[in-house]
């Protein structure tokens, strides 16, 4: 029997259908959350964010109607804070995280944010690469921040995101992902 050793063509990235997270999306989001993080947010945290927190903006990303990614951001006047972002493990490496990240940045900028911060595990180089690509730099660290393994958090920051320089960078990067 002849083996077909031809490499499988990489699946081309598709455009994520990104929409505001609704209460009925939370069970699907929780399933992805449990696959992505060693300790998960309680389901109520998502409900509270959607229903009670006027500063919070949460999104889901769908492919053919299935939720495969989600993310959230708080915007407090000029300050904004990315609270979470995740892609289902089976859908990683196909620009869906980047599309979700862009949606969060757009939301922050639209709501007047001038700078954006986030925390990331010191060991999470994949996420750090994504953030660095978008101009985020490490400004400090929080010792033992994560309760499950006492891992340090890096605090990353991007400033002057309403400035022309940053908007040009966003435009150039956006052109490289399906939009
Ligand atoms: C971080 C995460 C959202 C990235 O999503 P993704 O869809 O896999 O990433 P993308 O395909 O959009 O890649 C975007 C960028 O991320 C970085 N990246 C993605 N996969 C990577 C890998 N395997 N190795 C190194 N860098 C990687 C690169 O900078 C990449 O840009 P490039 O393709 O130009 O190199 C995803 O890995 C995830 O859900 N991780 C678990 C949850 C998590 O850690 N969330 C962050 C909490 S702070």
Image: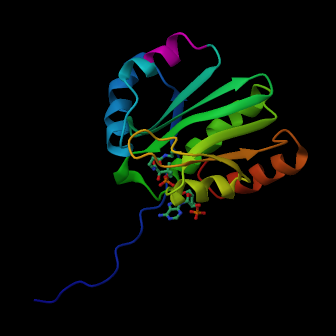
Task: Please give the range of residues in magenta.
Answer: 47-53
Residue 95: % across, % down:
53, 54
**Dominant secondary structure (helix, strand or loop) of the stretch shown in magenta:** helix
Residue 35 appears in the figure: yes
Residue 8 vs residue 81, the one in the foreground: 81
Q: Is residue 178 above or below residue 24?
A: below
Reply yes or no: does residue 74 show up in magenta. Answer: no
Q: Is residue 107 left or right of residue 19?
A: right
Residue 40 vs residue 149, the one in the foreground: 149
Protein image colouring: rainbow
Task: Spot the residue most to the bottom.
Answer: 2
Residue depicted at x 76% and y 45%: 158
Q: Looking at the image, how many numbered discs can be counted on the residues?
A: 0
The quarter of the picture where the N terminus appears is bottom left
Residue 81 vs residue 30, the one in the foreground: 81
Residue 94: % across, % down:
48, 57
Residue 151 vs residue 38, the one in the foreground: 151
Reply yes or no: does residue 50 show up in magenta. Answer: yes
Q: Is residue 114 left or right of residue 157?
A: right
Residue depicted at x 54% and y 54%: 122
Residue depicted at x 47% and y 61%: 12
Task: Spot the residue most to the left.
Answer: 1
In terms of image quadrants, where is residue 37?
Answer: top left
In terms of image quadrants, where is residue 78?
Answer: top right
Residue 157: % across, % down:
72, 45
Residue 4: % across, % down:
23, 83
Q: Is residue 64 above or below residue 174?
A: above
Task: Spot the residue most to the right.
Answer: 164
Residue 175 appears in the figure: no
């Amino acid at each position: 029997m002849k083996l077909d050793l031809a490499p499988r063509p990489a699946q081309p990235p598709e455009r994520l259908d990104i929409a505001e997270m609704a209460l009925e999306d939370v069970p699907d989001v929780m399933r992805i959350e449990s696959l992505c993080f060693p300790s998960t947010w309680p389901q109520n945290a998502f409900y509270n964010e959607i229903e009670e927190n006027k500063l919070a903006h949460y999104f889901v990303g769908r492919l053919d109607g299935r939720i495969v990614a989600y993310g959230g951001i708080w915007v407090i006047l000029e300050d904004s804070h990315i609270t979470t972002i995740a892609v289902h493990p089976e859908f990683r490496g196909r620009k869906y995280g980047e599309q979700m990240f862009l949606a969060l940045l757009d939301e922050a900028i639209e709501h007047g944010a001038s700078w954006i911060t986030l925390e990331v595990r010191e060991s999470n180089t994949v996420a750090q690469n994504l953030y660095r690509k978008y101009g985020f730099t490490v400004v400090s660290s929080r010792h033992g921040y994560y309760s499950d393994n006492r891992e340090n958090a890096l605090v990353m920051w991007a400033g002057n995101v309403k400035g022309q320089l940053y908007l040009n960078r966003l435009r150039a990067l956006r052109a490289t992902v399906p939009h």
